[in-house]
């Protein structure tokens, strides 16, 4: 069964001083299997969308349903690990009920043998992999990722992207991934949606002629997405 989020008619505005600032104005998005990447200009509401899907904020109107197990994992730009806990203990924080196999989750993210390491004994990329393993601890059918690799150097970032693809292939989970990087969107995305003006302004399914991901982006698609992202508001 298809998992992931099913969003319809989502509205959200914030109060700022005496003004109401509309952010999402009737956003609809039904996720398909795989990785859906959300791009869009700064301040268009990408983080707000993820927070609403995660239940961290309340929508003014609209419906968010998470198909599959209904459980969600979340990964942020910073790993947000507890410095006094080992890698395995940090991963265990992600479980809600029952016991997860922290060793298996760390192995899945390429950290076999580092179960007892403290965060300061791990590199930045390894800390991000612990955060990914923690997000998987609850058996989610959907992972929300908010610019998770933005703070990493290019080489580490590319390594993390490949780890994510491997984990996604192994677990079959759905991913809703926010990034500012068009290259990252084109490499990871099975589908790329552009958020503008409070709703989905463009929706692209990424087809790869070779059937494989490459780091040479599809220039034509990149141009189309760049144009939709940058176009002036009507
Ligand atoms: N708690 C809040 N109170 C008031 N306004 C908020 C709040 N959170 C977000 N906003 C406003 O909502 C809008 C969308 O913010 P959001 O963080 O979702 O955008 P974004 O697309 O993730 O931006 P960026 O790409 O710069 O990270 C912005 O105008 C922001 O100022």
Image: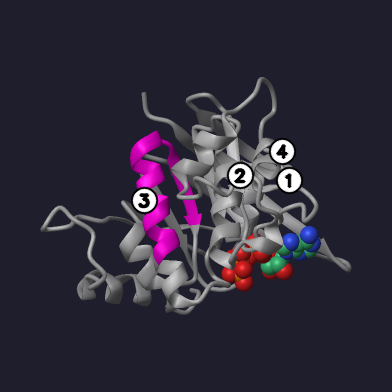
- Which residue, as the protein is rendered here, is positioned at the far right? 17
For the record, the magenta segment spans 159-177
Above or below, comparing residue 158 to residue 49 in the picture: below
Q: Which residue is mark 2?
A: 115
Q: How is the image coloured?
A: one colour
Q: CA distance from mark 3 to mark 2?
A: 22 Å
> Residue at the spot x=59%, y=66% of the render?
124
> Residue at the spot x=36%, y=23% of the render?
1
Going by the image, does 16 lie left or right of 29? Answer: right
- Within-10-Å neighbours for mark 1: few <14, some 14–19, many 20+: few
Q: Which residue is mark 3?
A: 165
For marks 2 and 1, give the one nearer the viewer: 2
Q: Is mark 1 within 8 Å of ligand 1?
A: no
Q: Secondary structure at mark 4?
A: loop
Label placed on residue 68: none
Q: Which residue is mark 1?
A: 57
Q: Which residue is mark 4?
A: 93
Q: Secondary structure at mark 2?
A: loop
For marks 3 and 1, give the one nearer the viewer: 3
For marks 4 and 3, give the one nearer the viewer: 4
**Which of pointers 3 and 2 lies earlier in the amino acid sequence?**
2
**Which of pointers 1 and 4 lies earlier in the amino acid sequence?**
1
Instruction: Give coordinates of residue 182: x percent, y percent.
Output: 39, 71
């Amino acid at each position: 069964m298809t998992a992931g989020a099913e969003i319809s008619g989502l509205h959200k505005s914030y109060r700022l001083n005496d003004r109401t600032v509309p952010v999402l104005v009737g956003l609809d998005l039904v996720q398909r299997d795989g990785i859906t990447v959300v791009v869009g200009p700064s301040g268009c509401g990408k983080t707000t969308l993820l927070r609403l899907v995660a239940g961290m904020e309340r929508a003014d109107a609209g419906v968010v349903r998470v198909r599959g197990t209904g459980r969600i994992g979340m990964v942020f730009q910073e790993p947000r690990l507890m410095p006094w806990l080992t890698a395995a203990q940090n991963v265990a924080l992600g479980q809600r009920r029952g016991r997860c196999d922290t060793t298996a989750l760390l192995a899945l993210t390429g950290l076999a043998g580092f179960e007892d390491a403290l965060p300061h004994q791990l590199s930045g990329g390894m800390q991000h992999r612990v955060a990914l393993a923690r997000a998987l601890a609850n058996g989610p059918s959907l992972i929300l990722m908010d610019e998770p690799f933005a703070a990493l150097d290019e080489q580490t970032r590319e390594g993390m992207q490949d780890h994510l693809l491997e984990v996604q292939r192994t677990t079959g989970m759905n991913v809703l991934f926010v990034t500012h990087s068009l290259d990252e969107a084109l490499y990871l995305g099975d589908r790329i949606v552009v958020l503008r003006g409070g709703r989905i302004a463009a929706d692209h399914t990424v087809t790869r002629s070779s059937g494989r991901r490459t780091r040479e982006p599809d220039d034509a698609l990149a141009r189309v997405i760049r144009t939709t992202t940058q176009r002036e508001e009507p």
